[in-house]
Amino acid sequence: MDNIPVPRLYTGIKGKNIDKRMTRTEKISPLAPANLPDFPEITGVMLATAATGVKYQGRDDLLCVAFPDGATVAGLLTRSKTSSAPVDFCRRNLATGGKARALLVNAGNANAFTGKAGDVAMMSTVRALAKKIGCETHEIYISSTGVIGEVLDSEKITVHMDEITRMLSASGWPAAARAILTTDTFAKGAVRRTDIGGVPVKISGFAKGSGMIAPDMATMLAYVFTDADISQDILQSLLKEAADKSFNSITVDSDTSTSDTLLAFATGQAGNGRIKHAGDPALANFRMVFQDLLLDLAQQVVRDGEGASKFIEITVTGAEDDRAAKVIAMSIANSPLVKTAIAGEDANWGRIVMAVGKAGEAADRDRLEITIGGQKVTEYGMAVPGYDEAACTRHLKGREIVISVDVGVGGGAATVWTCDLTHGYIDINADYRS
């Protein structure tokens, strides 16, 4: 897989911008999958990309997905109180319950916290695309990702509308997955095949995300497409259920983006019998596979966490309920002290004890059990006598870290995923705008 060039604008003496662009090539995360999946064509989905130069040079940074016959759409969007103009626009369009005709995504500029000027810039791109494909503006969904607080230069996007709509094809999946990246080091995609009532259906998706990752009812940017025939209310139910177990169970740095958007589109071209309710037995296989695909994408985001060198799974059991278990698990996953200890391959389980205690949920100190890499290291409120710390250290030297905690008060359980915190995270974010 090719490295993704990330442009940097260097600053000269007295803060003046040097009029040249330099580029650096990020190393692909050591946790990355070997390659993108082999995306199948999905009837009713057409894709194209273009290079606009909004921020990046020498790569595509604009994605258009068209649904010539329309598609049922469901979505989850950030609950950030400073959400972006595109998020607010998508929220309004979802409320109409109408079909989707197109998706437009740009990378490099989030068009967030840009006031009326940001709204005007966004609507300029929406109207230009609506005119080209012949639909209403409320049938278009839009996402922007990148720097916050800079108004999007809409002309750099609208000038490409003829090109990008002319290039739409059923096979543009890999380019689509790459066009939406920002600080990501690899493109993220997943494909599944299943059936509804015996009729074969396909599901494909791609996502972007590397930093500012602590989703709240949504994700960074993620898009899922299927040819299944599913109504909006059922698709929305499936999406929320799957997101709670995937994108809402990951964290890189505890920060929730202004632009988090998770959208699912169903073209209805597979020919399956219409599903009447979310509990329909014919939907069982689809539900399981749909959840698996979203979990795959969410975990790929964690594996591309900025500066990450280790993928960490944290399971909490014995909590008052599942909600409490998740709060405790996230407290551990978001702790800089836990994450840096793992980065340093230091089996300092005392930091896990700390993170459990600060979560604010019920926990029995004297029944707390911590397991690292399959070895129990604490019980009865103290370290297990003679536990093998060297074995824990060997486990932490690996890429895949597994931590289990039982807090001893009930039957609640939850699993979350995160990554370690290294100097790389600081290096990337200290000069993100430069």
Image: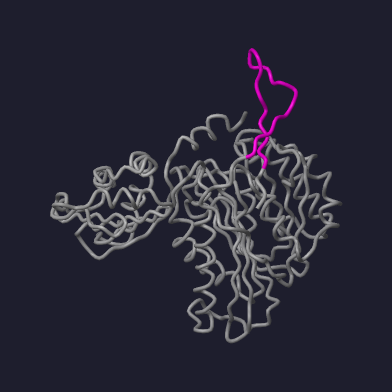
- Residue at left offset 45%, top offset 53%: 250
For the C terminus, give its image quadrant. Answer: top right
Q: Is residue 199 above or below residue 172?
A: below
Residue 423, x across and y down, in percent: 46, 35
Towards the viewer: 317 or 218: 317
Question: Where, by quadrant of the figure, is residue 168 drawn?
Answer: bottom right
Q: Is residue 315 magenta?
A: no
Measured as percent of width and height from the top left, residue 171 is found at: 75, 64
Report the magenta residues as a range: 5-25
Q: Is residue 106 left or right of residue 232?
A: right
The residue shown at (59%, 51%) is 208
Q: Position of residue 229 (x, y in %)?
A: 64, 77
Is residue 356 visible in the rendered image? The answer is: yes
- Residue 9 vs residue 213, the one in the foreground: 9
Q: Residue at x 31, y 62 (%)?
A: 413
* 146 on left or right of 318: right
Q: Going by the image, does 324 lie left or right of 305?
A: left
Colour scheme employed for the rendering of this structure: one colour
Q: Is residue 95 visible?
A: no
Q: Quadrant of residue 204?
A: bottom right
